[in-house]
Structure formats: C-alpha cells, structure tokens
Image (cartoon, rainbow, N blue to C red):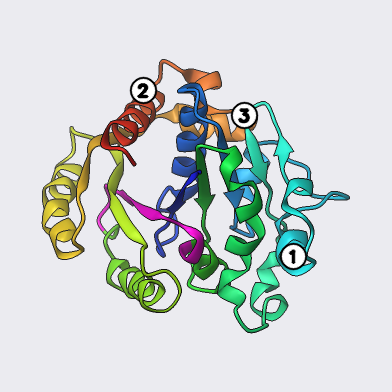
Amino acid sequence: MAKVIAIANQKGGATKTTTAIALAAGLQLRNKETLLIDTDPQCNASDTYQAQIEGVATLYDLLSQGEPVKNTIQHTDIGDIIPCDPLLSEAEKILSKTGKEHILKKAVTPIRNKYDYIIIDTPPALGVLLLNALTFADTVIVPITAERYSLQGLSQFMETVNAAQEYTNPNLTISGLLLTRYNGRTNLSKEVAEGMPQIADQLNTIVFDTQIRESVATKEAQALRKSLYSHAASSTTAKDYLAFVDELIKRGI
C-alpha cells in the first residue's frame, strides 16, 4: 500500500514542484515504485516529465469525468505521472458536487497497492485541488526557502491543514519542514535555518536534517525537461535531494 505524501505550502515559489519531482525521481532511484500526481494547473511537473496533455486522459478527466485512474497514468523516462491539465484552473467550478474533497482519494485508491509511494505536487493557493490532496495524503512535507519572506503564510497554511484534519482526513500528519535554496555563506540563510526549529515546535513537527542547497543545475534540468539526477547527478542540489530521500526512508516516512 503506497504511502501518500503531499508537497504543500500555500506560498508561491516555495520549491514545491522542484521538491516533488526530485523526491519522486529519487525514490525511483532507490528502487521504490513511485507515482507523481500533478495537481497544480500550471502543469510544471507534467512539463518536466514530458507528459502529454492534449488528446489523452489527464487529472482533469479523472476528477471531472470519472475516467478510470489506470487510463490517466503515463509512463515516462523520469517515472509514472498523472499529468495535470490547464482546464483545472477552473476546478472550483468543475468540482462542485457534495464530497468534492474526496474525489482524488476515491479515484486513485484502486491502484494504490501498485506503488510504494504516491507524491502529490500541489497548487500554491487554497482551493478544492489542495483540499483533495490533503484529504488523500497520509502526510505533508512543507518546503520552505531560505529567504526573508519564506515563513509568511505558513500560519494560514496550517489552518488549512487543521481544517483537513478536522473535516476530511483526521489521520493527516506533517512529516516536517524542508529547508530549500540554502546558502550557508549568507546570514539570511543561517537566520532562517536557526528560526525553523521554533516554528516546527509550534506546528508539532520537525525540521528535516537535510538542507537543500541551490545550484544552477535545477533550472537547467527544468529547461531541458529532465530529471535533476539525469542532468546533473553530481550537483549539490541533486546530492542534497537524494540525501533527503534517504532521510525519509530511514525515518520510515
């Protein structure tokens, strides 16, 4: 039975997609059968995976048309993905029936035992797609960039998580906070890192030991639509994300 992990933070630019792709691809490298679900209508993860959107069944069809989940999974060089669709930018209108927060969980559960992990890349805004992800997930990983305004909106995000725990998913947990775009040579990065344990205590969670350093290889891999590991396995960011994968496995997440 797959462990379902949502990569979420309501703040834009929080490296959610980068983290989701790196985690999914890294788990594949560790011989874990992994499925990535792209619930962000920007479709950036789907683009990196070089997934098709036109003329095929996507997450849109799964959620709004009742398409069987097996028909929406694409097998790519990076790994398996259920791609998003820009049509889901209208998700609030499309998914309006009673129980709308449970549609993703109900739709994907039939293939859950075929994977070790299901990773969900989430949109940056509160809405029905994020609520679907939180309702389906076993746990949440919150990426936080080492930048001045990175912690803004975190309290609002926690209200969303608490609402999901109360109304749709009482077993949902927060596995931890992941510091990304870290640069140990700057005072700002050090300040953010030093302040995170206090924030984690308030959220009843932890700060992961692994810190993700920034490198140009990340943007290069995105531009080339490749996995970070296949493009620049020796880059600091690739090494850090793979170390994070190992930390998750060691922690039993």
Q: Which amino acid does label 1 sit on?
A: Leu
Whether 166 is drawn above or below 119: the answer is below
State the CA–CA distance, disc 2 to disc 3.
17 Å
Residue 177 shown in magenta? no
Question: Of the residues tagged 1 and 3, which is closer to the observer?
Answer: 3
State the CA–CA distance, disc 1 to disc 3.
24 Å
Crowd band around label 1 with a 10 angstrom C-alpha radius: few (<14), some (14–19), many (20+): few
Report the front residue among 72 and 54: 72
Report the front residue among 195 and 33: 33
In the rendered structure, the answer to whether residue 151 lies left or right of residue 34 reads left
Residue at left 18%, top 38%?
186
N-terminal of the pair, mark 2 or mark 3, is: 3
Which residue position holds label 1?
A: 87
Give the number of the disc on residue 239: 2
Quadrant in the picture for residue 204: bottom left
The magenta segment: 134-148
Q: What residue type is labelled 3?
A: Ile
Give the number of the disc on residue 78: 3
Q: Quadrant of the C terminus?
A: top left
Give the number of the disc on residue 172: none
- Which element type, helix, strand or loop, lies under badge 2? helix
Whether 181 is drawn above or below 7: the answer is above
Quadrant in the picture for residue 240: top left
